[in-house]
Amino acid sequence: MPRMLPVRWCGLLAGVFAAFCATHAFAAVQQTVCTITVNSSNEKEAFRRYLPADKFRFVELVERGRPDWLESARRKGIRCDILVISGHYDGGDYAGGNEFFSEHVDSREYLPVDEMERVSCSASDDGLFSHLKAVYLFGCNTLNPVALRSAPEEIAQTLVRSGHPPAEAERLARAMSPRYADSSRDRMRHIFSGVPAIYGFSSVAPLGPTAAAYLGRYFQSGGAREIASGKPTSKILGYFPGRSLTLTRGSTDADPDAPFRRDVCQFLDDRVSPVEKARFVHRLLGRDMAEVRLFLDRLERYSGALGKSAHSPELTRALEAIASDEPARTRYLRFMRASEDPELRIRMIGVAANLGWLSSDDRRAELGRLIAERFSRATLTAADVDLACTLDKAYALDDVRQRVRAASSVDDVGHAAMLACLGASDDRERLLQALTSPSEAEVQIAQVYLMHRPISDVAELRGVAAGIMRMSDANAQVRALDTLADRRLSDPVALDDLARLFPVARSIDVQRAIAGVLIRSDYQSLATVELVRTLREHRFKSPSGRDLIDVLINRLEAAT
């Protein structure tokens, strides 16, 4: 009778056999490599070149000319094992672009991170991203760890504005920061929740051809086997020297920021009904305002879409419950008015109006209050002028003018520009003069004002052109000329003044600025042999070779 093995050896051999079978079964199953190519295809082709076709099937998710291609892939039942995304990446604040895009101006394909989040949040257990073993993000800053809004210092500031004492705010901020992680890296971890390996760049990424060359070397060293294993590996990082390639994993339910991801998904999950979303938003608005601030971009998009579709009776009641919540409204408006960031305050005013907390008149009053507060400052900047002009154009705030004029005794170009934005016609002449001021700050303020209220009168144009010729500061002169470059000038007197300025200009920047104005103007009326000769003889030598002055000379020669 044969000798029987001990039980512990039977168990060990069974485990080894199971692992052997699983490994070979894994290798035998063809894996799906999904590619999203919105810019360079070099990285995708490197993967295709080195991964064996019998083990890897490639599927390009981008469908040219179709905007909902990611949703289309989800509906087709595609299941990705590996995902390769190639594109320039805008990883700014959530209210900004935040998308993968192409460098080619004629390309219409791009990948909004919001859409990636929606697909991820709406996924079933067998969804598009649910089987992912590895994600490769070929774009700058895709795994940048810098917090966008959840840095402890910023959270502490918002906690103080919401009523917490400074010491308590600092303590709470340290606890909140990891719970509300919102860097580009954190956002990718949330999108690819549960994925064991996410590769991307913490700063600058290499261009497509260079990245493909690095990938080729990695694959030639056995990288294909590592990809097939589905396990994270730091080996690939060494093949991108000095290029900030880094590795992280997808988030899990055990992470401190898991509740934040669940909250975000409440806004995006297609499976959450409109009524449930409204009730979630109502609960969210009951939290500390420092937390509400961290969701402002989500609240902005949610509330902005409320008026674009019909509401069921139940949804109407849920939204009316938000609009009538006076304690939440009071806390929100108090926090909003305490903000010293005009852009943030305007966004919060918009959300309050969309949620029913501000009527149209209330909204205008809040914007008027903001302008009055900015106007009361001793020194105003071009940003303040841009704010006043933009708001007046959108909301017709001319009635604020008399109130703010009476509230301040300061009389300078900045305050005059804000009044001019609000419709004070007597201040416009002062801004036209400021455009040719010796002060670059005054020129900048006038430039912003005239961007919103451009020069159209011939007499104004001739006065400005003559004033530019008399300016002594070259930097301010360039700014003033750039203001005129946006206009297609046709007045012969103003154009002649600028042409006469070229030979006496004191820098190549001024000459280039003049060329920029003339090339956008009715330059055919100036096209003479004498002018071409003047440009050639008096131009400063360009240190960078051919420039805009050469282009202007060539066009004038062709027109003579």
Image (cartoon, rainbow, N blue to C red):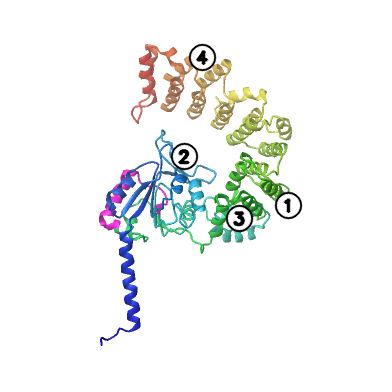
Query: Where does label 4 land, which residue?
Result: 491
Name the amino acid type tagged 3. Ala
Q: Earlier in the sequence, mark 1 or mark 3?
A: 3
Q: Position of residue 313 (x, y in %)?
A: 69, 46
| 194 or 507: nearer the viewer | 194
The quarter of the displayed image where residue 227 is located: bottom left
| 382 or 333: nearer the viewer | 333
Query: Where does label 3 land, which residue?
Result: 156
Whether residue 515 is visible to the viewer of this picture, yes or no, is yes
Q: Earlier in the sequence, mark 1 or mark 4?
A: 1
Q: Which mark is residue 228?
A: none
Element carrying mark 1:
helix
Name the amino acid type tagged 4. Asp
Name the amino acid type tagged 2. Pro
The residue segment tinted magenta is 199-224
Contact (Cβ within 8 Å) of mark 4 with mark 3? no
The quarter of the displayed image where residue 400 is located: top right
Query: Where does label 2 land, which residue?
Result: 67
CA separation in Å, label 1 and label 3: 23 Å
> At 47% from the left edge and 55% from the top edge, which residue is drawn?
189
